[in-house]
Image (cartoon, rainbow, N blue to C red):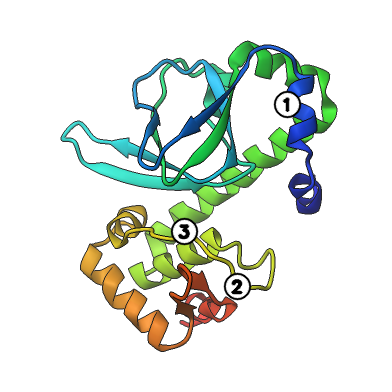
Amino acid sequence: MPERCISLFDWKKFLPAIGSGKTFLKYQKKQIIFSQGDPADAVFVVLEGKVRLSVISEKGKEAVIATMGPGDFFGEACITGQVILLKTATSVEESEIVRIEKSTMSRVLHDDPVFSELFMAHLLSRNLQIEEALVDQLFNSSEKRLARLLLLMAHIGKESKLETVIPKISQEVLAQMIGTTRSRVSFFMNKFEKLGFIDKEGGLRIHSSLLNIILHD
């Protein structure tokens, strides 16, 4: 499905039409939506706000793997037969989420071709991002990984404009997401700001010129 069609999908019209089997939920900042090890029995959609997905090792070390925004699905692995959630989902800011039960989601995917196409586009996009992140982790420096993460969060490449990423994303979380230390993130962020690639007026804003970090060998 073209990106423009995804952005224009009418959630307010669609959600009442699917009938029962859905729940609208509101979460405060840093509130846990579900935890690693909980039953995988529903798909979630972000309506407003942002959600962080993370995994925790047996030793208690947390690794942030993704940040989801409005229109993004998470918990979708239950559709493929996953019975236990492998991630923890936490609201980054005040967020509105809709929880769609697995049986309802399966029915709607079968009955509604437009929604099914939207969901498929999401899965393909997510798989592509995972592949790109793996290549990024294997071959690129931590500076390039940070630049790529900031560009993805700002949707640079999709729209040529400045966009607030997350008002107060911590450098510690950024470090977890790219697999480096907080001090390295701080160093690179200061460098990006001095070069005019980012600015912090009214929240963290990313300029498309940050692409120069990724393109430069």
Q: Nearer the viewer, residue 161 or 156?
A: 161
Is disc 3 surrounded by few (<14), some (14 to 19) or many (20+) residues within 10 Å?
A: some
Rendered image quadrant of residue 175: bottom left
- The answer to whether residue 192 is left or right of residue 60 is right
- The answer to whether residue 4 is left or right of residue 38 is right
Q: Looking at numbered disc 2 in the image, what kind of residue is underneath it?
A: Leu
Is disc 2 surrounded by few (<14), some (14 to 19) or many (20+) residues within 10 Å?
A: some
Q: Looking at numbered disc 3 in the image, what kind of residue is underneath it?
A: Ile
| Disc ID at residue 15 | 1
The image shows residue 97 at horizontal and vertical percentages of 55, 32
Q: Is mark 1 in CB contact (under 8 Å) with mark 2?
A: no
| Disc ID at residue 80 | none
Please, is residue 38 above or below residue 14 in the view? above
| Disc ID at residue 166 | 3
The residue sitting at 47% across, 43% down in the picture is 94
The residue sitting at 26% across, 42% down in the picture is 62
Q: Dot 2 lies on which element? A: loop
Please, is residue 84 above or below residue 182 in the view? above
- The answer to whether residue 132 is left or right of residue 14 is left
Q: CA distance from mark 2 to mark 3?
A: 13 Å
* Precedes in sequence: disc 3 or disc 1: 1
Please, is residue 97 above or below residue 49 in the view? above
Q: Dot 3 lies on which element? A: loop
| Disc ID at residue 162 | 2
Q: CA distance from mark 3 to mark 1?
A: 27 Å
The residue sitting at 82% across, 23% down in the picture is 112
* Precedes in sequence: disc 1 or disc 2: 1
Q: CA distance from mark 1 to mark 2?
A: 31 Å
